[in-house]
Image (spheres, rainbow, N blue to C red):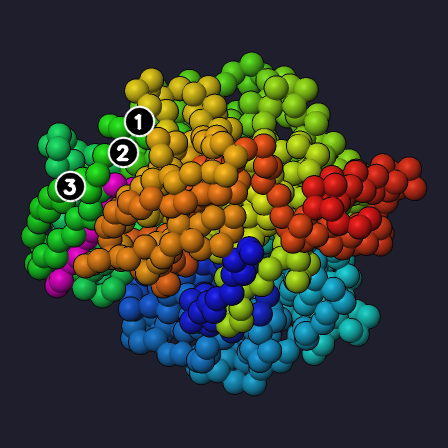
Amino acid sequence: MLLVVALIVPSARAQGVYPAARTGGSYMYNYYFPPAGSSTPWWPSWSPDGKWLAFAMDGSIWKVRPGESIAYEIVWAREYLSSPEWSPDGKWLVYTADDDGQSINLRILDLETGRSTALTTGNHVNVDPAWSPDGKRLAYVSTDPNGYFNIHVMEIENGQSGRVLAVTADHSFGRNRLYLGAYDLHISPTWSPDGKELIFVSNRDIPLGSGAIWRAPVEADVMNSGKATIIHKEESLYRTRPHWSPDGKRLVYSSHLGHQYVNLFVLPAGGGEPYKMTFGEYDSFHPRWSPDGEWIAYVSNEDGLPQLKLLKSWGGKQQLLKIVSKKWSRPMGTVTVRVVDGETGRETPARIYPKASDGKAYTPGDAYERLSALREHLFHTPGRFTTEVPPGEYTVEAVKGFEYWPAKETIQIKAGKTHSVVLTLKRMTNLKARGWYSGSNHVHMNYAGNLHNTPENLFLMNAAEDADVICHLIANKDNRILDYQYFVPGRALHPLSTSERIMHTGQEYRPPFYGHISILNLKEYLISPFTTGYEGTAIESLYPSNTDIFRLAKQQGAIGAYVHPFGGPVSGVQMRDPLETDLGIAKAFPVDVALETISYHELWSTASEVGLIPWHHALNNGFKVPVTGGEDSISSMHRTPLVGSMRGYLFLGKRGLRWDRFTEALLRGRGFVTNGPLLEFWAGKAMPGEEIRLPEGGSAIRFRAILRSLVPLDRLELVRNGSVLEKIPLPGDRRHAEFEKDIEVTHSGWYTLQAFGNERVHPVEDARPMATTNPVYVMVGGEPIRSKESADYFVRWIDKLAQMAGSHPGWRSEKEKQHVLAQFQEAREVYVGRGGVNP
């Protein structure tokens, strides 16, 4: 009998970010919201006289003179501050205050007295402040009152808030849109020079992307008045941020039109053809006209980290405003930290969790600050860094993968003094010395985040996470392909690869209906169109199927798998079997299992026992489906799973690390999947992925297991055919256990070892720690591994899938539909045959 998984997970309000926002999600948090704690400049804003640029950095508001490199801190608070906007008379500065992912509110600074006053309060998100030209009103975006993003205009007099006009109102598209939800967005307002109109971004009546550029008068509920008009439509993703020129004739905005990177464009204010202003192989975004219209300030990640730049509005001159000196408004000290490997005594890359006396991170200016699944601020270091921090208690912790004990120190910082800290990482175990190598199946290098990532930095991040193998996946994001230039036909590994760490470039094919898949070992070309089923496009059809894509990939000698397939946190309810819902993400998984078009399976991207259910059913049908892990790290973003936070450990033995050996072990299932716990498991002398053959009637087998974990766990279980056979005690601190027992085996079956914790626990960057091995297969006589229950499970699944696909509106022809439905039927007949289920 297959074990049914049912568990309660924490509510999104308890574990999520910006709980008042009922739409948005990860892409909005990464592309649209101010990044809490950026170590480099963000959100430029001109002073009315054009002599200063205000910006956000280190959670404070700063200013710099154009052409200079010394920054002056204007205002600091315990919250993370961003989005400064100078009032037209130069007396006030509005900015946002983010209480680290719970809410964002507007404040106004009196530049003469230095006193700040709240303009909004409460638990909602209030962002995108923009002064009217007369300085009497402030446009902004708020989730108040119902959790959806609307544009409001607030009256302001002498720094005090007044009446608020709701320019837009809640409006539903009628169904969920891909990545964007049902309710419309109304964001990024900018004023006309006469103060009578706004230009903004909205996805009203638009199925894909964050919206078109609209123009409308400043009136209540203007989207329903018939007075709002689209002046430019393209598929956008939160980067647009239009800004009206001082002369009122045009606007500047950011777009990835025709490119994988975001660049600056200008557009007539009444609509027309866009004209490109920057041409970099990197991202240029958040443009702002100077008061005289001669310059455009913007953010560029040309050198990796985002920095301020200036672009002459005519003539083409560009100027980098790199901050080399910070003039703090308060006393500060300096700290230098070294991370040392306890065995070698040498500096070593690591993940760093810093916390200063005010609760902030103060990431060094040459590192990219991130926000983790644990909602902690962190960055990766090559082994040494120096940064400035306020006086008082400073705590810094180094973490390196799953096999080193974290190292943590707390010191007292004194103003004007320099301090040194050495963090020594000591090993808990060394699996590599015994032939084990680890890596993520699912890493994206660039995905239009604030960071322009590079292979060199990706190698550093993986070294800091103690991961040996990087499966870098090229993918589409909507209508563009990211990092395609890194695929080289016939090249298995990136040139930076060594005997210690390797990177392979593959592809993620991302159809929202069937489920996303990874494809490795492509030798000739990337497979297009990278997706199917995109509403309103020429690739809306569900043809070709994932089965067709897997088969096409195999013609190049490639291997493929479903990725981030099932499960994940659900708000305050039980996590449910995908068959009871909409079949999860990997809807076509059982089809490609039956037709043997998948080569392996990415079991988990995040912690979720639900993902075990379809996999166990596949194993119970006699299909040997090897599994690995891949966290889907979109590593150019600041809010994303860390590289290697869910990975596969594979046993290569004494032969050493090579890509062909790693993929051979992957396809044989010679390992385990984990976000922290380390498992070793044997049935007799057989390891995971191996098979034992017993004579008719069977015999006893000695099962052995070893668990090691950096954090306490709650369950360690020996599983047979999906049911728990043995609950193994976890003694003492619940970090280590060994098990050995002779068990009588009389029927064919598969056996795995699995481990779970019940709660989030530092430093496991996931909802909770968990791991499972691949199976050891035990065959008794000539009996196959079969389960009528599991066969019937997939028959019902495919029937539901066929009904969903049959009613999809995107098919271009009946021929296409029948081609795919015939594949479903073929797979269904396989399960009918394996389970004796009546057709």
Question: Is 95 situated above or below 120?
Answer: above
Is the C-beta separation of discs 3 and 1 under 8 Å? no
Position of 113 compared to 125: left or right?
left
In front here: 758 or 241?
758
Q: Position of residue 785 (x, y in %)?
A: 58, 40
Residue drawn at (14%, 50%) of the image: 334
Which dot marks residue 435?
A: 1
Q: Which mark is residue 466?
A: none
Amino acid type, label 3: Lys
Indicate which disc, 3 or 1, sits on the residue closer to the N terminus: 3
What residue type is disc 2 on? Leu
Residue plotted at (53% across, 40% down):
748
**Quadrant occupied by the N terminus:** bottom right
Residue 718, image x, y percentages: 40, 50
Question: Disc 2 designates what residue?
Answer: 431
496 on left or right of 228: left
Is residue 69 shown to the viewer in this render? Answer: no
Q: Nearer the viewer, mark 3 or mark 1?
A: 1
Magenta-span inclusion, residue 327: no
Dot 2 and dot 1 residues touching (CB under 8 Å): yes
Quadrant position of residue 158: bottom left
Q: Residue furthest bottom?
A: 163
| Magenta-highlighted residues | 392-403
